[in-house]
Amino acid sequence: MTSHRITRRLFVSAALAAGSAPWFAWADTPEWPDERRIPPFVIHADFAIQSLPQFEGELAGLKQDLATFLTLPERLSEVHVYLFGSASTYREYVTRYFPGVPQRRALFIQANDVPMVFAHRSPHMLTDLRHECCHALVHQSHNDLPLWLDEGIAEYFEAPRANRMSRGDYLPQVIQEAKLGEITPLTTLERLRSVDEMGDRQYRHCWAWVHFLRHGPNGAQQALAQYLSAQRQHPQTPVSYFLRGQFVDADAECRRYLMSLNAT
């Protein structure tokens, strides 16, 4: 599910594109039929939010779950979430206030220092919201994460909580690729600079490496903790540097871990 991606590398251009639009024109519009707060999220919808089953619990749970992975600030900035009942209304709104922004099914845009997520109703809406809201929260605590890790974390948390470790659209193929020695080396992923370089394979392998770092052997989890601790002072030091302190061959360890997983 990569058709809706827009990452931090485009947030800046999105904000610039929005620069000519006055803030009040698209953030403080008082005409939203339904609005509510699920801290740190402020929801604005042009339809009844109660028609979305599990919506509020999903957003509240996302913050709690992400806090077990990253250290989030005690006080998070409000994230404004704009929901549209139709794709056409969504596209018209985004095009009006953010001309030049790529058309995606959902967007995270940072403008005037305010994080915002835009999405429209579809069968993928909750997945889209988990992914983009994850970006919005991660951006507040670690805004210099490398592309592969930023996307890998969002890929991990976009799945429902019960399916994150074993999401059926990724895990069986990842296990097979690990058996064939086809998991992308981490140093290769670390060289990614743009989503234009990423396809389904890259997103899948970013997810696989995050899976390894979060649930794999103690050495992998320790390397991730060391990286996150050092990241603010040394943002250019890659995760692979810390993995080398734990494993002779981190790529082989990752493949071995993935092969040990059960796809059912």
Image: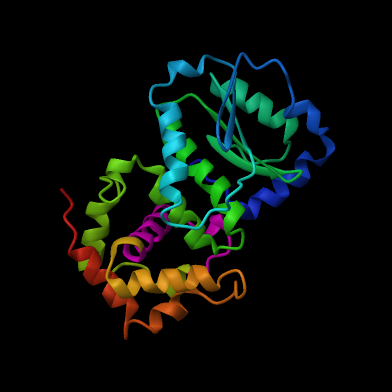
> In the shown orientation, is residue 133 left or right of residue 209?
right
Q: Is residue 30 left or right of residue 46?
A: right
- In the displayed structure, 218 sits above or below 116; it is below
Furthest toward the front, the residue is 74
Residue toward you, 232 or 11? 232
Stretch of the chain drawn in magenta:
190-213
Q: Which residue is drawn at 48% across and 61% down?
A: 149
Asked if the magenta segment contains residue 207, the reply would be yes
Q: Where is residue 247 in the image (x, y as percent from the top left)?
A: 32, 82
Which of the colour schemes (rainbow, by chain, secondary structure, one colour) is used?
A: rainbow
Total marks drawn? 0
Look at the image and say whether residue 199 sits in the magenta stretch.
yes
Q: Quadrant of residue 61?
A: top left
Quadrant where the image shows the N terminus: top left
Foreground of the two, 2 or 80: 80
Q: In this view, does 112 lie to the left or right of 11?
A: right
SS majority, magenta: helix
Residue 103 position, x and y percent, is 60, 37
Percent across and percent down for residue 160 are 34, 39
Q: Is residue 164 visible to the viewer in this orientation of the structure?
A: yes
Q: Residue at x 36, y 65 (%)?
A: 213
Vertical arrangement, residue 122 with respect to residue 108, above or below:
above
> Is residue 104 something that shows in the picture?
no
Residue located 35% across and 61% down the image: 214
| Residue 215 picture location, percent across and down | 29, 61
Quarter of the figure with residue 68: bottom left
